[in-house]
Amino acid sequence: MPLAGFTAALHRWADPQHKDWFAYTMYHRAAQDAVAASLGARYGVAFQPDDILLTNGVFGGLSLLLTLLVNDGDEVIFPTPPWFFYESMTLMAGGTPVKVPLRPPRFDLDVAAIERALTARTVAVIVNSAQNPTGRVYSADTLRALGELLARRSAANGRPIYLLSDEAYSHLVFDGVKFHTPTAFYPHSFLMYTYGKTLLTPGQRLGYVAMPPTMPERQERRKLILAAQMIQGWTFPNALMQYALPDLEKQSIDVVDLQRKRDRLVGALRDMGYELGTPESTFYLLVRSPVPDDCAFCDRLAEHNVLCLPGSVFEAPGYFRVSITASHEMIERALPGFRSAR
Amino acid sequence: MPLAGFTAALHRWADPQHKDWFAYTMYHRAAQDAVAASLGARYGVAFQPDDILLTNGVFGGLSLLLTLLVNDGDEVIFPTPPWFFYESMTLMAGGTPVKVPLRPPRFDLDVAAIERALTARTVAVIVNSAQNPTGRVYSADTLRALGELLARRSAANGRPIYLLSDEAYSHLVFDGVKFHTPTAFYPHSFLMYTYGKTLLTPGQRLGYVAMPPTMPERQERRKLILAAQMIQGWTFPNALMQYALPDLEKQSIDVVDLQRKRDRLVGALRDMGYELGTPESTFYLLVRSPVPDDCAFCDRLAEHNVLCLPGSVFEAPGYFRVSITASHEMIERALPGFRSAR
């Protein structure tokens, strides 16, 4: 069930405190303050409240930034296997998608491959750490190398290459792995966050775009982003969700329990002979299909009442994706199916 | 204060009824059913629940439709004085804005002028009845003439000219004037509605796009709209608001009281010598500025603590806009200021 604290926050802030409680809302100051304080405590970076631009999740933040930054024919680099919507959203903004494969088996960011993919038309690089669906969290060294590369190539291009950092899973990290925000390593960065994963409530659209204090010309950018959010269709989060944000910022699903489910599934699947890495984050395991056709194998799993997503659907043919958000009971019930299908 | 029923609906639906209560939500069936039933009862048109596409208000609906329909260089006709965002949203979608003046003093729709503005590149005509800021509600005869014109010119163009009907104020009509939805008079129509005006809660984004049953190829269009709402950044209303919609559909601010405020202000301003029509809807009076420079006159009003919007801001120079959503007490307090400024 959804977190009790989440429901409590909705009730708490549903009661109007003045006549304009549900009036047009852009950025609720207390929400901006809460985010800036939280980012400061997490990353030691002094994000300013004015640079917290509230959006309808990462979905809304990415749409906003692509619309603002991309002109027809500009290239947007993103990793593959990617989140489902990077490609279609890039196309919708008039951009040209450029995919750079992550390096199996660990699916690390391939900075050298990104370097080869950069051109004079590159306007943005989308980075997703912790990465969906591979569960990889990028190291500070990797992110530093990426930042140095982008700085060098921006200078050569005579215009900035923006780093769009999709941090949807940043609060769901296992094993005490340290999450570094990529925006700490490169000035022309936008941090995109959603509360939908941390709270398992993606139907209540809430998130933000944050500009690090190193970003140049922030005052002008704030105005552009505000105007774009209006013209895109008043894409600010609902007033109620903005009021609730400071309460929600402190909440999370039980990450220790999620890690326990990960451990149970990773261990059991390996014992059965499946090949898979150990994700450091996200809701997923990425497992090698025992037969080349991952769709056929997922059909076979389905015959054993186990539902998995074939990798071919998200540019990872030969793999399938297992969700670890199911209950412990469901996971135990699924294990015999995994065994029989193999 | 916001309606007690509005707050009650938020509380009622904030409590999760199952584990997926706040999961990704597209179109909640009960909300679609409630809207279709309400439109049927109001207009005698058999809107189908599947054709009710829930959006973040008219803002979201218009952004969605312009993005879907407009290709670079396509022309979008809309009336002037217009709602603030028609022009910028048309430009954002890659379209060319074409403005057709409403005819003062009554600000009726000028079908002959629209006819002259139509070209082979016209892709859409935005109609706003009841019209913001003039308060005019268009007659069935006017809308029938518009529908016939668009049908004729669509046939000549060999592609449809879409009618985008902004009906934000359709539930706030005075004097028993009959509101006709423009979509009843022309098949290639989209009805756009928001609950933000009727409930005075624009911060809680909720509305819809509805296709009348006369619209051709509705099944294919539903799929396109669904995909566009995902790719635009998951622009479906929050789950909570969708659950609440059937309750909210029955609610409204007190229109009789709003009409009383209109009557008090219209009468008092006319007695002072101001020239103004009697709006049949909306939150506004459009008043002739006693001096040619409406900005200067609004400055003078502000010196008397009366805040009005100069018409120059919304393409109605020589006029100013008075809001009637203030309390009765505020209205009485403002009257001496209106008298002194004249």
Image (cartoon, coloured by chain):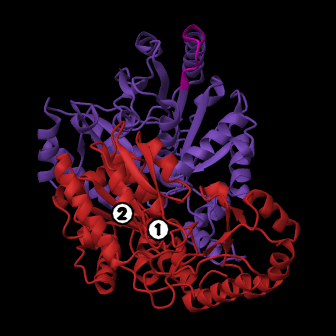
Chain colours: A purple, B red
Q: Position of residue A156 (x, y in %)?
A: 57, 7
Give A174 or B201, whichever is nearer the viewer.
Answer: B201
Chain under disc 1: B
- Residue drawn at the location 73% of the way across and 41% of the way down: A40
Whichever of callouts 2 and 1 sits on the residue coming sooner in the sequence is 2
A321 to the left or right of B110? left
- Amino acid of disc 1: Leu
- Residue B206 numbered tag: 1
Q: Is residue A308 above or below residue B81?
A: above
- Residue at 35% across / 75% down in the picture? B31
Instruction: Say left or right for A83 vs B300.
Output: left
Which of pointers 2 and 1 indicates the residue nearer the eye?
2
The answer to whether residue A132 is above or below residue B175 is above
Outermost top residue? A156
Residue A232 visible here: no
Above/below status of B172 relative to B161 = below
Query: Residue B18 is drawn in which quadrant?
Result: bottom left
Check disc 2 and give the amino acid type.
Answer: Val
Residue A272 vs residue B284, the one in the foreground = B284
**Which chain does tag 2 point to?**
B
* Helix, strand or loop status at disc 2: helix
Q: Secondary structure at mark 1?
A: loop
The answer for how far apart the CA atoms under marks 2 and 1 are is: 31 Å
The answer to whether any part of residue A61 appears in the image is yes
Indicate yes or no whether the magenta region holds residue A161.
yes
Tell me where the magenta segment starts and ends, as one range: A155-162
Q: Which residue is mark 2?
A: B111
The residue at 17%/43% (across/down) is A298
The numbered dot on residue B317 is none
Q: Quadrant of the N terminus of chain A?
A: bottom left
| Camera-side residue of A150 and B141 | B141
Q: Position of residue B125 (x, y in %)?
A: 36, 56
